Image: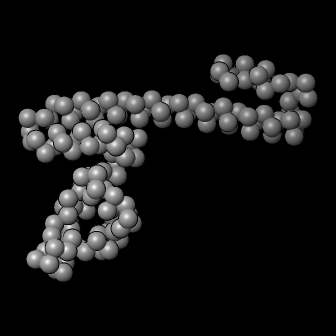
Amino acid sequence: MANDYYSIGEFAKKTGLSTYTLRYYERENLIVPHRDQKQRRFYTEQDVGWVHFLMHLKGTGMSMNEIQQYITWRAQGDATIEQRKELLQNVRERSLSQIRETQNHLEILSHKIDWYDGKLDHSIRDSESFAEYLKQFKTEN
């Protein structure tokens, strides 16, 4: 195929996904391959960009149903921009909330590591519990 067209194997390499995953995406109507005269799948550079965008959506924790809804609205054109924007804003807020929660978990984990270090180097009293240690940071455990 010409440089601008990719077989499923080439497309898999370009996107970093397996051919199995690409076929799954096709079955789920997330991607629609083009077909040549012999009905073989082929993909374009624009398809590579679309799959990379899908990977970003998936990376935010967007559900398959939400991705499919987004794709349906996208296919309907500019009349659905407001719905797509609202969906993406909701996903962004949910993702940011998960990031904040993960940051809190990591903070507690770091304090636990520091508490262990203090126990090992005896800078923390043997009798001091982790809950007591955390009080100085005013952090919930």
Percent position (x, y) of residue 91?
34, 34
Q: Is residue 10 left or right of residue 95?
A: left
Up-down relation of residue 11 to residue 46 (above or below): below
Q: Looking at this view, is 90 or 112 the one in front?
A: 90
Q: Is residue 116 left or right of residue 76?
A: right
Position of the N terminus, as image quadrant, is bottom left
Up-down relation of residue 87 to residue 6 (above or below): above
Percent position (x, y) of residue 15?
33, 64
Q: Residue at x 32, y 62 (%)?
A: 22
Q: Residue at x 20, y 35 (%)?
A: 84
Position of the C terminus, as image quadrant, is top right
- Quadrant hosting residue 77: top left
Percent position (x, y) of residue 53?
28, 51
- Quadrant hosting residue 9: bottom left
Percent position (x, y) of residue 98?
47, 33
Q: Residue at x 24, y 56 (%)?
A: 31
